[in-house]
Image (spheres, grey):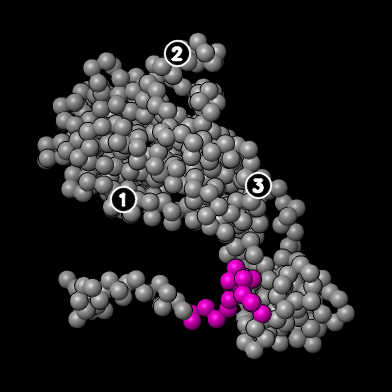
Amino acid sequence: LISSLIKGFKLPECSKLCRASVSTELSGVFPNQTMSDLSRRKADPTSSVEVRGWVKRSHKTGGMTFAHISDGLSTDTVQVVIPRSVCSSIPLGSSISASGVWKESSGSQQECELEAKEARVMGKDADPRYSTLTPDQLRKALPLRARSDNFAAILRLRSRLALATHQFFQDANFVHIDTPIFTANDCEGAGETFVVKLDGDKDSFFGHDVFLSVSSQLHLEAVTAGISRVYTIARAFRAEKNQSSTHMSEFSMLEVEISLCESLDEIMDVAEAYLRAMARTLLGAFHAPTEADARALGAYSEMSRQLAESLTKIEKIPRIRHSEAMRLLKEEIDHSLPESGSLSRSAELALVDHFQGPVFVTHFPADQKPFYMKRNGEGETESFDLLCPFVGELAGGSMRVLTREELERQCPDGKLPEALKWYAVMRERGKPPSGGFGIGFERVLQTLLEIRNIKDTTAFPRWFKQCKC
């Protein structure tokens, strides 16, 4: 099937058309200049320039209003000089449109400014004092968050991180998969799922219990039965009744699955390469707007610098078995351990401090990990957690169980739930050895930018008792 839009084109011509589309299709769509582009443009008194944005600050001198305009696309602002005869009132916080001449500025704070010939107020702000609002106030006034300079910078950095993530995996020939939000299973059996039901309908819409997805892993595994490298950035939902700074009910997960793979080290190599690439993207100062946003957040702190430096100085992130991690915590770090033998967040951060940077902990005891993880003959799983500064566990992954018999044996009570029969059938249809990992997208931002509250990494956070818009 070929779309009528490209019928008649040869494949090379289609490729050229796709490459050119970004630069040509949008040219001329927006009549106004972005502040980032205009602030780097030399004075040109012969051309007409239009800007649109919000008044971040202003002052009046004589019959002139000097308004600093932001479009929210970068930290850059442009000074617009507006005579009273052009527009009598330019309120702080209002959105405006102005056009005129881009000329050299007589002031010392900017090289050029826009001398407005036309200007109009597009929308007035009843209370523009965003800088006085605390982070906690802005968490509860979600529609206003983007007007805060700090939150706007976080959202721009998140957007660049998402683009860099897709670029990283596309360059490595991974295929992006859109995984379902509705699912018949709880991936890890944690029991913290949201149930989907029709309001007032006694019968299930799907004919059986359906939940909001807690993970895309099982569905990605199904795709690896025919496509060997896949990934997704998908929404995940957990019904945890927790209001701490580390919990949200809805978040984004980067999940990666690789088949035709027999080594846990290969999976860890991909996770490590991804972390290094994202550190370069957000902390490497290769992209001026990215650097400006990071500096606006104070992200070039000592901890962020140490993380960036540790990733560039070491050839590989250290990899230690869980048993060795427990020994280090007890004998060298002198950190108290729970009787269960599991790693608490404080223990994870103690190991990070000990290694002065990220560290992989591998081969967790089987009773600490989900049923789908491959096990060795020593009661351990072929699994790993990637521990990082500030957040503790950043990523978790494993090799997957290869045969149906092993899968059923490792299920709780030795019985495979009806909703997972399809997952077991894959093992009888030529599914090769595979492994994968998941990384909380918001936690990557927390790790690299030292954002203390995970709710500040996304535009519309949802958590226990908080979902108002």
Q: Which mark is residue 327?
A: 2
Farthest residue toward the right? Answer: 62
Counting every numbered tag in the picture gives: 3
Q: Quadrant of residue 369?
A: top left
Q: Secondary structure at mark 3?
A: loop
Q: Quadrant of residue 108?
A: bottom right
Three-letter amino acid code at the position of disc 1: Ala
- In 3D space, how far apart are the residues under numbered discs 3 and 1 (Cα atoms)? 32 Å
Q: Residues within 10 Å of mark 1 (few under 14, many from 20)?
A: few
Residue that numbered label 3 is attached to: 298
Q: Is residue 438 visible?
A: no
Residue at x 22%, y 37% (from the top left corner): 261
Magenta extent: 28-43
Vertical arrangement, residue 285 with respect to residue 406, above or below: below
Residue at x 61%, y 75% (from the top left corner): 41
Which is more toward the observer, 23 or 436? 23
Q: Is residue 249 left or right of residue 426?
A: right
Q: Quadrant of residue 323?
A: top left
Magenta run includes residue 133:
no
Which is more toward the observer, 351 or 138? 351
Vertical arrangement, residue 333 with respect to residue 129, above or below: above
Residue 421 on image: x %, y %: 19, 37
1 or 2: mark nearer the eye: 1
Q: Secondary structure at mark 2?
A: helix
Residue 126 on image: x %, y %: 73, 66
Q: Is residue 263 visible?
A: yes
Three-letter amino acid code at the position of disc 2: Arg
- In 3D space, how far apart are the residues under numbered discs 1 and 2 (Cα atoms)? 37 Å
Residue that numbered label 1 is attached to: 172
Residue at x 29%, y 36% (from the top left corner): 266
Farthest residue toward the top? Answer: 331
